[in-house]
Amino acid sequence: MQNQSRDREHPSNSISHNTADAKYHKPWRKAAASLSLVLLGSGMTLAGGYMAGHSQQVSESASNLAVSRVNAAPPLPAATDPNFVTRVVQKVGPAVVRIDSSRTVKTQLPDEFNDPFFRRFFGSQLPQSGERVERGTGSGFLISADGRILTNAHVVDGADTVTVTLKDGRTLQGKVLGKDELTDVAVIKVQAQNLPLVALGNSDQLQPGEWAIAIGNPLGLDNTVTTGIISATGRSSNLIGASDKRVEYIQTDAAINPGNSGGPLLNSRGEVIAMNTAIIQGAQGLGFAIPINTAQRISSQLIATGKVEHPYLGIQMVGLTPQLKQNINSDPNSGMSVNEDKGVLVVKVVPNSPAAKAGIRAGDVIQTLGGQAVTDASSVQKAVENSQVGSDLRMELRRNGQDINIAVQPGAFPTQVQ
């Protein structure tokens, strides 16, 4: 059966959770394969950020971005010689940076540990209240000559200080202009001029089998280069176990590891096509990167306003197939009856969400959204993401064999404070 998807997830959900909450599991509703995503941290392993188990706990205006893209060095010609990777590294390497971040974490003991009895007999063995500094490292790349840097949000999450080290050895203090945890994109600014910068490609045109070159700082090994191919495009966040993200990832077999987070994934012409972000723990050759078109769209909003508004409806959904229709209708515990064998079935509506206010119900089958036919949850997600908060989004539904037209106004996804 196909994976369920939500256009709204609680930001606090762990990325290693399955795509559907346990209480929604039914015999006909098979959860996605249990994958432990290593966000290259917290239940996940990050390619950068604060990574548990490491020797150190690694646990302005938007228009300027477009100008930077125009001023960037022109792309290299298509690979025609065996040393094309070397040419790419020589061209792009100076614009790839190391990002070191630190945060102070306060530790507070339970009141029971302050009991005089405990202190008298176990004082030397009891942990102490106080503060500790957690340090993390990741990668990033310069997108403007005046010091704007793209990286992952988890690389700088909660950081008190951010230090950027250039390939030429210079170390600069960085300021986080904004971060978006829903897509895991952040923008850092350093005070400098005439810096080298990358050229941005077009991730919408990628095809499996194309060359992929990763540059970053895995496990403290600065300026590491690895190569591979684009293994797949359009990997949904639910499919790879990242249900709290809203990204369609690029999959690559180029080796990426903790510390690669935020670094560039390049094509054979030296253009950035994605930002390295995650791997599947225990697997080989399963790396995931945020498409550069997504990262650029998010970063433009972060530069302009310091935050990002994501439209959402508040539904849990699944793409229908004849087999799924049969499974639902033959299950006496499914709680619904489906007449259609294609479209997108609304499994759950979040109370007080935009969908609930528009009258959408569990059991409705979405046929079109914004005038476009939809056949899977991913296409609904895309249509919602491309809409505007507060604008009318027309939806054609099938309910109990009847055609229904509804106008729903997407709301702003309720994320944590940036």
Image (tube, rainbow, N blue to C red):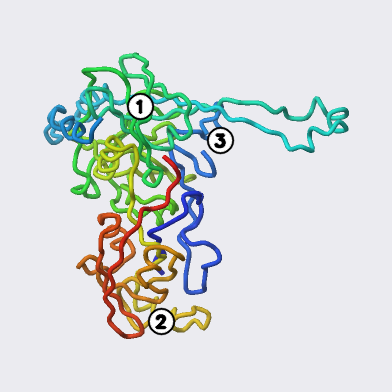
Query: Which residue is label 2 attached to?
Result: 326
Quarter of the image where the C terminus is located: top left
Q: Position of residue 186 (x, y in %)?
A: 36, 36
Quadrant of image for the N terminus: bottom left
Q: Residue at x 13, y 36 (%)?
A: 78
Counting residues from the N terminus, which is met first, the one under dot 2 or under dot 1?
1
Q: Which amino acid type is shown beneath numbered disc 1?
A: Thr
In the image, residue 227 lies at what x, y percent?
30, 35
Give the residue at x 26% y 21%.
Answer: 94
Do tag 2 and tag 1 residues touch (Cβ < 8 Å)? no
Residue 125, position in %: x, y? 79, 28
**Amino acid type of the residue tagged 3 in the rendering:** Ala
Could you classify mark 3 by the number of other residues whose Cα lies within 10 Å: few (under 14), some (14-19), or many (20 or more)? some
Residue at position x 51%, y 31% from top?
58
Q: Tell me the residue that label 3 is attached to.
A: 52
Give, as a three-letter code, the residue at label 2. Answer: Gln
The x, y position of residue 201, in whole percent, is 19, 39
Closer-to-camera residue (222/293): 293
